[in-house]
Image (cartoon, grey):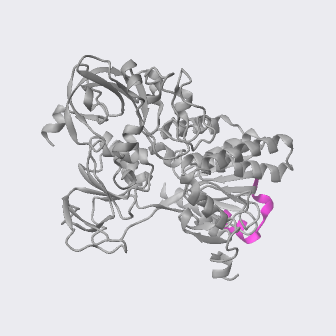
Amino acid sequence: MLEETGIPDRDDIQNNLPDEERLKEGPVAIFECYQEIPCDPCYYSCPLGAIEEFEDINNLPELDFDKCTGCAQCVANCPGLAIFVIDYTYSEDEGVIRLPYEYTPLPEVDEQVIALDHSGEEVGPGRIVKVVNNENQDKTAVIWLAVEKEKLVTVRHFKRMEESSDG
Amino acid sequence: MDKVDKMDRADKMGNLDKVHKMGNLDEIERIELAVVGGGPAGLAAAVKAAELGLESIVLFERDNFLGGQLVKQTHQFFGSKDQYAGTRGIDIAEELTDKVRKEAAIEVKTGAVVQGYYEDAVIGYLEDERFQKVKPEKTIIATGAAEKMLSFPNNDLPGIYGAGAVQTLMNQYGILPGEEILMIGAGNIGLIVTYQLLQAGVKVKAVVEATDKIGGYAVHATKIRRAGIPILTKHTIKEARGDSKVEEAVICQLDENWNIIPGTEEILEIDTICLAVGLTPKIDLALQAGCQMAYVPELGGDVPVRDEDLEMTEENIYIAGDAGGIEEATAAILEGELAAINAVRAISGGGSDLEAVYAEVSEKLADLRRGPVGEEIRSGLKKARGDENAGRDRYSRQRRYSK
């Protein structure tokens, strides 16, 4: 399905997640990197050594969930914008997804947005919690987006309210 | 004023004529290395040759700026971290250009168009409206690629662009090509340009792809899909419609034999169609120089036959980058370096230092091509090196126009 539509299979998405115990501990990175292409910046971006060194540059990345703190350095450094951080511990009802974002203008903190899934379908409201855009991110901002916890597995992007009015 | 100009021109033509008639090679400037093309392969080749000790290198670029296609690439590159991965194409162009400008051994000629490579190993080029000559010991051809076109009714309407033109307008000059676009082709270029259009605020109605699979990297596809852009495989454009410019595109579904499935036509209202249907190596100069060609579909069409050292069938001429086969910029940079190392080795006779650099660069290039996405390139290169089907489908200018 991925290679016909650009939408990853549900099972593949689910398989990227760590076990429930780890999810309850706090933010963690998930890699939606399904194709063996020559690429290795994620390994160099991780300050904690949680991403295994590449034996072959074409291999898929391997993350040690126990070493990962969800700092999102890799999110901004992945050229494919294929890494996200999900956090089930943000609040009682809400979780946060930290996602890479390269559109301008950047959203404002507390802005209400519409959360989108892997196919760009609207899946409900979201709220911008934080916008991180440091020098070392080379213009790939990391947006913290709060959504209902059960939607953390499906939400990967968002659109602004003003965009939705004109379709 | 007019008179002076005319006299000046007559004088120049006269000189030119004299050189031709006399055929006096002593009057022509001699250099060690000529590099034709100031894109990633050419820039990397010139820098590497200077680093390895050559003292007279001329880099020819027909545009008025260096960087080639890199100057339009606003996305981060893949590949190896120590080979620009994670860096945006525009920044790679700047870095390489800086390196070239810092090397005293490299003479940069922008706005200089190479016209031909002649039998006595003389390069003729046009600069400042003057035809001039230089005689290099070695030449590296790094002329890049040209875009392919797609046939469909009304494909000549205004508003129908190649992806390169859309990138030039948008990323180099800050001009939006249109407001509502249909993208044809889901290879890396089609997907990347779609993403850049979205970043510029342009609405992309759909990406259509005639084959049954997205050809570009999956991460490029997921990026635009989650922004809501449909990628329609097994679809093509049937025709464009419009009066004085494109107003509608008729798209349709294809069956497994590439035939249009009747009744699947759909009309999209758009003001721009962008064609990203592939590239083909720009081989004119190599062909004119008499180098043998081979038809290798995996590399984008007709490509020069070359040996392991990237030297073509005419001695002293090397090929690097997309001109030798369609790949991507990181590979082009490494090939440029390899061609330079080989040229330097042939001039200076080599040495252990040179061999170490050679081993390092060729290993990086092999790493890049090792994976599943490098499979086509690996099989194509075998053919282009003549390892397989040697002699088949080969032709050269000599054969077509006998001397």
Q: What residue appears at the point 73 percent right and 51 percent down from the top-left corner?
A: B33
> In the rendered view, would you say B75 is above or below B236?
above
| Nearer to us in this view, A84 or B135 | A84
Q: Quadrant of residue B400?
A: bottom right
| Nearer to us in this view, B240 or B290 | B240
Q: Where does the magenta region start and end? A: B14-31
Q: What residue appears at the point 66 percent right and 44 percent down from the top-left corner?
A: B364
Name the residue at the left extreme: A165
Name the residue at the bottom extreme: B402
| Nearer to us in this view, B282 or B54 | B282
Horizontally, residue A120 falls left or right of residue B78, namely left
Q: Quadrant of residue A110?
A: top left
Confirm whether the magenta stretch covers residue B20. Answer: yes
> In the rendered view, would you say B138 is above or below B100?
below
Q: What residue appears at the point 27 percent right and 61 percent down from the top-left corner?
A: B158
> In the rendered view, would you say B193 is above or below B297?
above
Q: Position of residue B23 (x, y in %)?
A: 76, 68
The main secondary structure of the magenta stretch is: helix
